[in-house]
Amino acid sequence: MSSQVYAGPYGAEPRHPGWPARLGPLLVPAGRLELRPIRLRDAADWSRIRLRDRAYLEEWEPTATGPWGDRNARWSWPPQCMSLRSLARRGQCLPFAITVDGEFAGQITVGNIIRASLRSAWVGYWVSSKLAGRGVATAAVALVTDHAFTAAGLHRLEATVRPENAASVRVLTKAGYRQEGLFLRYLDVAGAWRDHLSFAITAEETGKGVVARLVAEGLAQRPEQR
Ligand SMILES: CC(C)(COP(=O)(O)OP(=O)(O)OC[C@H]1O[C@@H](n2cnc3c(N)ncnc32)[C@H](O)[C@@H]1OP(=O)(O)O)[C@@H](O)C(=O)NCCC(=O)NCCS
């Protein structure tokens, strides 16, 4: 009997398929949106936005130890950035910076990548409050979803969101994610155990791609269409 390990329909997989990568550009109401690997020199922009946006972000992010000011100080970025990039080199996550017109505007991460016969991961994101409601998160989710199901060789993406987070529920719905269930007291967010809706999408559901659908619906444009 053969002792070969099943490597999936993609054959022998590279160590970190789909990484590093630059995704986009796409034109959205906020400007020209691209995704690129996070980098150490994002520290100043990352910290400035997150210190300013505490009230807007903290309500939705997992509880962590230490004051917000310390956790989001400029000097807190290098260890986080290096840890995420190290996971990316091992094929366990895809940590992107979102840029709009070349400026750092937030993060989108595909995390906890499991391969073999599951080929699944979660997606998480935040966007600067200054750009809210102008199509940034939806386009970013569309770009990483298509990338995850092509270059990164994944089959399923999941996202969990508090039912009260109407903006994020809307982002996932626009990007074609399905609501699958409700996880009770799922995650410690803003100091308490919070229920979360679970959303998911599988490769079969994306047809010609999530970006192509957004473009067809007029929610984003490819630059060459201008
Ligand atoms: C959630 C978040 C990423 C959305 O980013 P964004 O770039 O503003 O998202 P988009 O512009 O692509 O789409 C937002 C949609 O939500 C809608 N929306 C925003 N606030 C809303 C509200 N209070 N109620 C209902 N809909 C709302 C917008 O109108 C838009 O929908 P539309 O295009 O149909 O008009 C951003 O608000 C954020 O970073 N929040 C804090 C962190 C967070 O919640 N992260 C996600 C955790 S699951």
Image (cartoon, grey):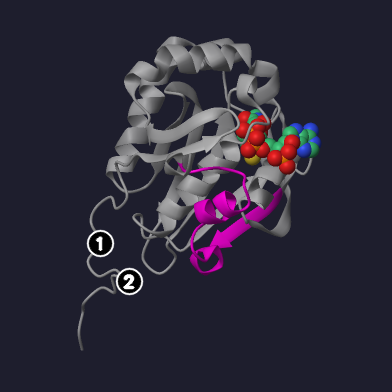
Q: Secondary structure at mark 2?
A: loop
Q: Is residue 30 magenta?
A: no
66 shown above or below 14: above
Determine the secondary structure under disc 1. loop
Q: Is residue 218 visible?
A: yes
**Quadrant of res 127:** top right
Q: Residues within 10 Å of mark 2 (few under 14, many from 20)?
A: some
The reply to whether the residue tagged 1 has its Cβ within 8 angstroms of ligand 1 is no
Residue topped by disc 2:
8
Give the left or right position of residue 169, taking residue 222 as reference.
right
What are the residue bounds of the magenta stretch?
A: 197-222
Q: Position of residue 113 (x, y in %)?
A: 42, 52
213 in magenta? yes
Q: Which residue is the site of mark 1?
A: 13
Question: Does the CB distance between marks 2 and 1 fall below 8 Å?
Answer: yes
| Cα separation between marks 2 and 1 | 8 Å
The residue that appears at 51% across and 55% down in the rendered structure is: 212
Name the residue type under label 2: Gly
The image position of residue 28, as x and y in percent, is: 56, 35
Pick the residue in front: 126 or 197. Answer: 126
Q: Quadrant of residue 51?
A: top right
Amino acid type, residue under disc 1 in the picture: Glu
- Residue shown at 61% from the left, 24% from the top: 131
